[in-house]
Amino acid sequence: MGRANNGGRPSARSQQRQARGLLVVAGVLCLALVGGVAALFSLVASAESAPAPAPTEDGFVDIIQDDEAPAEPEPPADDRAADLALDPEKQTDWKFDGTGEKTVYLTFDDGPSDNTPRVLEVLERYGINATFFVTGHEPDKAHYIKDAYEAGNSIGLHSMTHNYGQIYVSEEAFFSDLEAVGNMVKEQIGYVPYLTRFPGGASNTISANYCAGIMSALVDDVQARGYQFYDWNVSSGDASGTNVPVETLVQGSCVEGYTNVMLLFHDSNTKDTTPEALPQIIEYYLERGYKFEPITREAFVCHHGVNN
Ligand SMILES: [Zn+2]
């Protein structure tokens, strides 16, 4: 007779087993459903009890929590910072012919120093602004960089060490120094500015003692990296010695024939006569209809010819 055959229908026992199995499955499903609904309610409840995120200025609620925000570089604090911050994307927008208006850009290299507050006092007295190309000479006076910036002056990078034998040995050495002074400035004003001035200017020949052709390479490379360098077309002559007489500085600074004057001074402990000469120089240009501006991206860009 072979194996038991009940016409293909399951036996009573196996039907019982199946029914029990179905009951178990249904029970599990019920539990899952109840659990899910409970979990959902607890989620809603916790969402309601959590403090609601504050709407942003444009009225949208920021649903990204702080601890989930992607790590991106901090955006510059304001429009001025955004304009003056180093940004390789902006190099094509630079204007090389200025605004065409009679403008003097007073520039002070090598600070900060004990004379920085004296220079700032004169600028404030006349309600004008200038540009400071700073160094890392005196770390304990670095806070003057912040003071100068907050008073409306532009901050540019000159050099951390100002040591020709160190910075002009190679492009790598130059940019390592530039990065250091950039970081120092960032600590004071919150960003690395795009403005630079080469120690000795782009026309210097001293660099040839350390690396032939380095200035030719650097003038292109600083711009390719998003910096712009500013040489000068008028020099006060205050670099020619310690405390050069005021009359000599006034004579050197007050010239005719330029629409845009990029005027070189030095901010140094040994140059007390520079802030003393400033009022006469400022008045000379004011009387001739010039305005005074800090360097920005709209400013005249003065480049010397390169000699190395
Ligand atoms: Zn210098």
Image: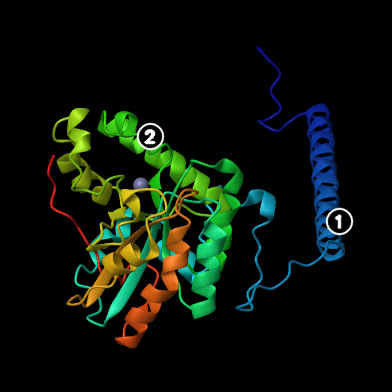
Q: In the displayed structure, would residue 145 be above or below residue 164?
A: below
Indicate the position of residue 30 as horizontal and vertical percent values.
84, 48
Residue located 23% across and 73% down the image = 255
Say if residue 11 shows up in the picture: yes
Disc 1 C-beta below 8 A from ligand 1: no
Task: Look at the image and tell me in which quarter the N terminus lies.
Answer: top right
Taking depth in this image into account, of 121 and 184 the one nearest to the observer is 121
Q: Position of residue 25 (x, y in %)?
A: 79, 39
Q: Which circle's residue, 2 or 1, is located before the other in the chain?
A: 1
Q: Residue at x 65, y 73 (%)?
A: 56
Kindly report the distance in space between the C-alpha atoms of the residues bearing marks 2 and 1. 56 Å
The residue that label 1 is drawn on is 42
> Relative to 50, is 8 above or below?
above
The single residue placed furthest to the top in the displayed view is 2
Identify the secondary structure beneath mark 1: helix
The answer to whether residue 72 is left or right of residue 307 is right
The mark closer to the camera, 2 or 1, is 2
Query: What residue lies at 21% left-to-right and 36% top-to-bottom?
Result: 206
Which of the two residues, 66 or 235, is positioned nearer the viewer here?
235
Q: In the rendered structure, which amino acid carries the disc numbered 1?
A: Ser
Q: Is residue 186 above or below residue 96?
A: above
Does dot 2 land on a helix, a strand or a loop?
A: helix
Q: Which mark is residue 176?
A: 2
